[in-house]
Amino acid sequence: MSFQPLNSDFYGYENALTDQEKSLIVELRAFLETEVRPIVNGLWADAEFVPRRIVEGLAGLGLFGQPWEETRKFENSAVFRGWVALEIARVDASVATLVGVQNGLVMGSIAIAGSPEQRAEWLPRLASGELLGAFGLTEPLSGSDSAQGLRTVATRDGDNWILNGEKRWIGNGSISDITIIWAKDSEDGQVKGFIVPTTTPGYTATKIEGKQSLRIVQNADIVLENVVVADSYRLQQGKSFRDTAAVLRLTRAEVAWAAVGNSIGAYDAAVAYADSRVQFGKTIGSHQLVQDLLAKSLGNITASLGVVTRVSAMLDEGTQRDEHASLAKFFTTARMRETVAWCREIFGGNGIVLDYDVIRFFADAEAIYSYEGTREMNTLIVGRAITGKAAFV
C-alpha cells in the first residue's frame, strides 16, 4: 500500500516526511483501520481498556520509545512523532493518549531524569509493551499549581524513601505495572521522581468511574500510604520541578498534534456523512450552510497543522521553549473545540449516537482541551513571554 496524504491535510504538510517515516505511517494506518476502528465505539461505550493485542501491536510498530536511542526503531523527527499522534487520534483519542502516556510521560521521565543505568533497565521493557506505565503528577488539590502545590511527600529513610500522598486523574493508573510518582522531598522541598511498581505495599489505585470523555483511558485515583521504595528507584538525575517541566514540554506539543487529529476524525466523519445524507432531494453536502461548516472546519485544521508542524520543528532544532509549546496547545485545542462542534452540527440528531463516530470526537475534545495544562494556564505562560510579567496569581 502506497502513502497517500490525508484529504484534510489541505496544504500537504505530510509530504515533508521522509520515505521511511511515510512507510511507518502506512503501517500504522493499516493497523488502526483493521484492529482499532472496528472495536473502538464498543470500548468507548463500555469504558473498557483496549485488548492487550492492541498494546502489543503498537509496541510492535515501534511507537513506544520513538525519541530515545535505546528504543527507537529508526532515526525520526519530532514532526514525525507528531504525525503519529495525529494519525492515532483521528481514529481514537484515547488510544493516542495511551501512546502519549507510555511513550512521552513515562518513558520521557526516565529518559530525561533517569540515570544511564535506569534508562537501560526500564526503557526497553516499556518500549516492548512488557510493562505499562502511568505518570503520577496531578493531585486532588493540585493541578495547575503543581510546581508549588504538590502535597505528596517523599521522606528519606537510609537507602529507602517513604512516599505518602494522593494522585488523581492518572491515565493508565488502574492498570499500570509501574507509575512515575512525583513527590516533594520533605528535607529540601524539591520535587523528585520515583519509579513505583504498582504491587508495592501501600500503593492503591482505584479507577475513576462516570467519566464521559476519553472513556477508554483508565484514569485512577492513587493513594500512597507509607510506600517504601529503594533509592535506586528514584530518578537519579531529577533534582527539581524543572525536570518534571522538561517532560511536560516534550509532550505538550504532541497533545496539540492529538488535538488536530481529533478534529480531523470529526471532520472526516462529517465529510462522509455530507456526501451520503440526502435531504430536500440532494445530499446535504450540496447545501451552502453545510459547506460553510466544512470549510471553517478545514480552515481550523489547516491553521493548526501549521502551528504544530513548526513547533515540533523547533524541538528538533533545539529552539523550542515553554511558551512555544503552550501556544500550540491552547491554540489547537481551542480550534478543536470549535471544529468538533461544527462537525457534530452537520449530523443533526444522528450526531449524538456512537454509530456515526462524531459524538466520540466531540466528547473526547473536552479532556484534550483540559489536560497537559488548561487553556488559561497556557495563555499565562505565553502572556509572560509577551510582557515579561508573570500573572499566575
Image (cartoon, helix red, strand yellow):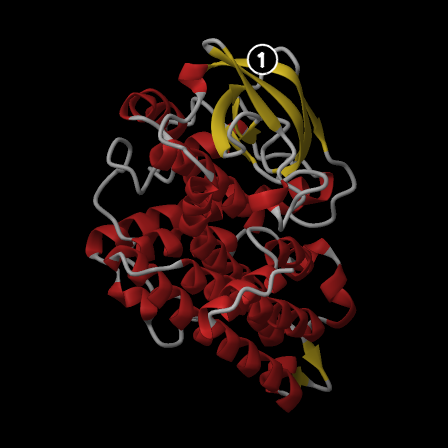
Q: Using the image, determine if residue 110 lies above or below residue 22.
A: above
Residue 60, relative to residue 260: is it above or below?
above
Residue at the location (65% across, 60% down)?
393
**Where on the picture, by quarter, is residue 344?**
bottom right
The number of numbered badges drawn on the structure is 1
Q: Is residue 103 left or right of residue 49?
A: left
> Can residue 168 be seen at all in this image of the molecule?
yes
Where residue 279 sits in the image (x, y, percent)?
Answer: 72, 81
* Residue 62: percent from left, percent from top: 33, 37
Query: What is the secondary structure assignment of the residue under circle 1?
Result: loop
Q: Residue at x 39, y 51 (%)?
A: 84
Direction bottom: furthest residue:
288
Q: Nearer the viewer, residue 154 or 20?
A: 154
Under mark 1, the amino acid is: Thr
- At label 1, counting other C-alpha atoms closer than 10 Å, the crowd grade (few under 14, some 14-19, many 20 or more) is few
Q: Which residue is mark 1?
A: 200
Residue plotted at (30% across, 62% down)? 314
Q: Is residue 124 above or below residue 57?
A: above
Residue 268 visible in the displayed image:
no
- Depth check, front residue: 377 or 375: 377
Find residue 112 and report its horizontal and vertical position in percent.
Answer: 35, 37
Q: Is residue 104 left or right of residue 36?
A: left
Q: What residue is shown at x 31% (from left), y 26% (from top)?
A: 115
